[in-house]
Image: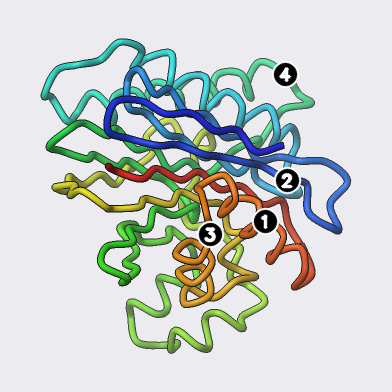
Amino acid sequence: MTNFLTAPGVEYAWRTDIGRLRSRNEDSVAIDAGSGLLVVADGMGGHNAGDVASRMAIEGVIGAMQGSTGEDDQRLVAAVRQANDAIYAAAGEDYERSGMGTTVVAVWLRPTRLVVAHVGDSRLYRLRDGVIEALTRDHSQVQDLVDRGILTPAQARASTRKNFLSRALGTDPDVVIDSAAHTPAAGDVYLLCSDGLTNMVEDEEIVAIIRGSASLAAATELLVAQANEYGGRDNISVALARLG
């Protein structure tokens, strides 16, 4: 089911789907319109309790940021770090959860500033004036090879190792969290998503679906449906925000 809500100057829609091949959904999505927060987390497949880790990530970030209205960008980074500490501790306390981890991409959207913090290969995109731009860089082994010039982007997309993360939330007590700040503009659409979308649907098609949809809710439905149409090999999660 797609969730949809509005807040002053912003529309939101989000959905998570199990896909076609997985037996359970290890993705989690949350939006807190009151704080301007959007969070997507993708529990690490093949690891114990990935769904627990992703849920702890979004609950931890949202809980730590509840009611935040200040201008300190590092609040979001601190919230993600707090979630990392909680997941790491929980994994150490329960053998069945040993090694659990998750990606996370978290956005704090304010009237004149957008802050993003992320770990892993879930992504943030901005669609502005018909042009899509990735505002995060994947923390994956394949992306590292692209950055070093060993693989081309096309080779990376076809690689069977593209899901091997070089960094994840909850697996290391001293995780490095990437963060950045951007200036939002009226008409911007921001997309947070797990790799269940981006591994299946090309950027150009994502743009076409968002621009051609009657609403954000319809766009989330169509994005998920397209990923499933192309095979749905993983869980699929999308969160959209459009600025008025």
Quadrant of the rendered image containing residue 150: bottom left
Residue displayed at 60% across by 51% down: 218
The kind of residue on which mark 3 rests is: Ser
Mark-to-mark CA distance, 1 and 2: 7 Å
**Residue that carries the numbered disc 4 in the rendered image:** 94
- The reply to whether discs 1 and 2 touch (Cβ–Cβ < 8 Å) is yes
Nearer-N-terminus badge (3/1): 3
Quadrant of the rendered image containing residue 35: top left
**Residue that carries the numbered disc 1 in the rendered image:** 224
**Residue that carries the numbered disc 2 in the rendered image:** 17
The answer to whether 178 appears left or right of 46 in the picture is left
Answer few, some or many: residues within 10 Å of disc 4's Cα (few below 14, many 20 plus, some between 14 and 19). few
Q: Position of residue 199 (x, y in %)?
A: 61, 69
Residue mark closest to the camera, 3 vs 4: 3
Q: Position of residue 30 (x, y in %)?
A: 52, 29
Kindly state the secondary structure of the residue where label 1 is placed. helix
Residue in the foreground of this view, choosing between 68 and 100: 68
Nearer-N-terminus badge (3/2): 2
Mark-to-mark CA distance, 3 and 4: 45 Å
Kindly state the secondary structure of the residue where label 2 is placed. strand
Count of marks, rendered view: 4
Mark-to-mark CA distance, 4 and 2: 28 Å
